[in-house]
Image: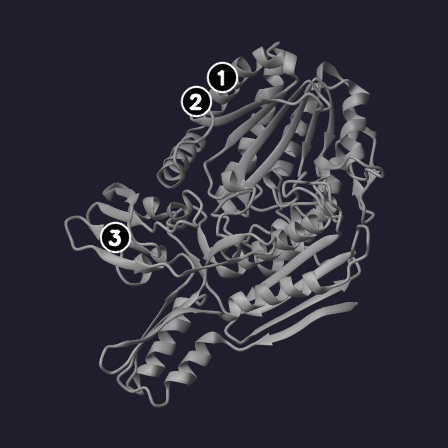
């Protein structure tokens, strides 16, 4: 193991309490930090005992915390004027206010452009306007680009009420991120990838894990740091290799941020290590009413019980990618799930559908889990943080997207092409998921770079890809399939709610909504089948009834699409 960084960072909250506990009686201290409310209230109480008036607020999503901690949104219609900083991407502060529209509910909410660069102005009903500061600083990101990012801030007034300090401060949360990225930039990496088997970033630091009264939403600074570190390291290594930001082919190795929220000073260790077999969680007792993702051993057992011709391939880390061909009747199709291994509902939905296809005697091919290395990592990370999205498990152990792989050896990617060609598949059913709650990267501009469309959930939606000459088939197929899916009242209500919240914070969905289900249609001349249906259900990471609805919807989409294939829609 090679240690790139082993760093302890003092807790900013403690540093501030110690600084103002002596010689500051009568002062007023305001600070914005990446800390949870309980710790901030306790620090205020400590300073009160020495005559200091303190108010410690959240630097992360300050408007939402304002309504959670200072002014609950229980009155009349809410009006919000948004910050207007020239360096902020369009829609940034409206997204940062998510999911306020859902929390306000029937009282209603409207947004408008404001005049202050770093403050929201809010008013409930005909009440007074209140300013809510949103601390941000303009800096240079890991790719050398100017970026406006949330930050710590300190504002101090003396006994006469004069402001003696008012500006950004580097909190331990920011320091951990910046020191990790500096260590990555300073290390002498090999000339060609993969650069490491595993790059482990283990961090323990203060923060917040606050559940909201809407959907699966949770305010999590540790999850946000996971996302910032994972994608920033990947983006930096792409940039260093001269690749575009949206490239999905770089194979740096497996990047694993393991971020834990704790009531203690910050500590971070960055180490290059070997791939290891990780501890896995147990799965549900029954497939049909599964309330959580399957364990890898369950996927193997259920797939093997279905028989079929084995066409297995081996993953980069040596795991079996189960691939099966089943003889039968009807137009042939390929069914796969978990290309992105933190999208887990598709595996359950696919296995449930395959049990029915086997009973009906259909001809098809099946890959239940395209990315078993990522799936094993996802189970490990869920053991620590069960509600997080864990995008470190999205890609393969090589660090690339399985679908984007073009160079030999193909490893996991080989199964898809082999099966499609073996049966002459006309349709590829490719079951996916996406974040079930807001996806943020606060220290790199807040909106995930290259993934703005995925930052907040918008219900279940479909992506339909076709060869260029087959465009006329797309709309009739989607009209029929979405009509079938909309028959489920629970799904229809779910989509209606999520789309309304999306529109309040992100505007109109940028593609057609058919029968209450958004649908993206595009031509892909190089895909392995004439048609590909990609399901997208917000399933990262959900449990209980929410997970049951997810995998039931995945199953119904699969069964419905195959029925339409048999009826000649494709």
Whether residue 265 sits left or right of residue 400 in the image: it is left
**Mark 3 nearby-residue class (10 Å; few <14, some 14–19, many ≥20):** some
C-beta proximity under 8 Å, tags 2 and 1: yes
Separation (CA) of disc 2 from disc 1: 7 Å
Residue at x-position 31% and y-position 87%: 50
- Residue 323, visible in the rendered structure: no
Image position, residue 351 (x, y; %): 66, 33
Which element is circle 1 on?
helix
Residue 310, quarter of picture: top right
Q: Quadrant of the N terminus?
A: bottom right
Image position, residue 265 (x, y; %): 54, 76
C-beta proximity under 8 Å, tags 2 and 3: no
Q: Which residue is mark 2?
A: 515
Image position, residue 76 (x, y; %): 19, 47
Q: Which residue is mark 1?
A: 479
Identify the mark nearer the N-term, 2 or 3.
3
Which element is circle 2 on?
loop
């Amino acid at each position: 193991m090679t240690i790139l960084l082993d760093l302890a960072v003092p807790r900013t909250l403690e540093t501030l309490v110690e600084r103002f506990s002596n010689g500051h009686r009568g002062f007023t201290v305001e600070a914005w930090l990446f800390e949870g409310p309980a710790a901030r209230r306790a620090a205020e109480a400590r300073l009160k005992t020495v005559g200091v008036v303190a108010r410690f607020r959240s630097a992360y999503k300050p408007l939402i915390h304002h309504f959670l901690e200072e002014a609950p949104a229980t009155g009349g219609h809410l009006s919000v004027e948004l910050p207007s900083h020239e360096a902020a991407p369009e829609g940034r502060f409206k997204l940062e206010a998510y999911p306020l529209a859902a929390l306000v509910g029937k009282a209603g909410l409207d947004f408008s452009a404001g005049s202050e660069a770093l403050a929201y102005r809010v008013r409930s009903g005909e009440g007074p306007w209140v300013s809510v500061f949103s601390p941000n600083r303009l800096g240079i990101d890991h790719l050398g680009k100017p970026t406006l990012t949330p930050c710590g801030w300190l504002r101090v007034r003396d006994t006469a009420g004069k402001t003696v300090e008012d500006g950004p401060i580097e909190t331990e949360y920011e320091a951990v991120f910046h020191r990790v990225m500096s260590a990555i930039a300073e290390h002498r990496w090999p000339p060609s990838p993969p650069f490491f088997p595993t790059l482990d970033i283990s961090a323990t630091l203060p923060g917040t894990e606050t559940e909201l009264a809407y959907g699966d939403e949770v305010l999590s600074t540790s999850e946000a740091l996971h996302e910032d570190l994972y994608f920033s390291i990947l983006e930096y290594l792409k940039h260093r290799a001269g690749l575009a930001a949206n490239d999905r082919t770089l194979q740096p190795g497996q990047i694993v941020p393991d971020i834990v929220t704790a009531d203690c000073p910050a500590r971070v260790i960055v180490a290059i290590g070997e791939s290891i077999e990780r501890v896995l969680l147990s799965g549900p007792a029954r497939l049909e009413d599964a309330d959580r993702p399957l364990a890898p051993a369950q996927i193997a057992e259920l797939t093997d019980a279905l028989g079929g011709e084995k066409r297995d391939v081996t993953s980069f880390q040596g795991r079996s990618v189960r691939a099966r061909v089943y003889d039968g009747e009807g137009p042939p199709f390929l069914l796969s799930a978990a290309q992105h291994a933190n999208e887990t509902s598709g595996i359950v939905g696919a296995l449930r559908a395959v049990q029915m296809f086997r009973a009906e005697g259909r001809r098809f091919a099946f890959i239940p889990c395209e990315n078993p290395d990522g799936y094993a990592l996802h189970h490990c990370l869920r053991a620590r943080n069960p509600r997080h999205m864990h995008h470190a498990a999205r890609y393969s152990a090589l660090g690339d997207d399985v679908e984007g792989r073009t160079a030999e050896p193909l490893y996991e990617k080989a199964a898809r092409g082999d099966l499609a060609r073996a049966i002459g598949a006309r349709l590829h059913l490719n079951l996916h998921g996406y974040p079930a709650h807001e996806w943020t990267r606060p220290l790199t501009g807040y909106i995930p770079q290259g993934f703005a469309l995925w930052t907040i959930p918008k219900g279940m939606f479909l992506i339909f890809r076709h060869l260029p000459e087959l465009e006329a088939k797309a709309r009739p197929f989607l009209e029929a399939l979405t009509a079938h899916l909309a028959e489920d009242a629970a799904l229809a209500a779910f989509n209606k709610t999520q789309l309304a919240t999306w529109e309040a914070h992100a505007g109109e969905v940028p593609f057609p909504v058919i029968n209450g289900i958004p649908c993206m249609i595009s031509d892909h001349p190089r895909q392995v089948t004439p048609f590909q249906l990609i399901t997208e259900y917000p399933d990262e990471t959900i449990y209980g009834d929410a997970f049951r609805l997810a995998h039931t919807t995945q199953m119904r989409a699969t069964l419905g699409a195959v029925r339409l294939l048999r009826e000649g829609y494709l």
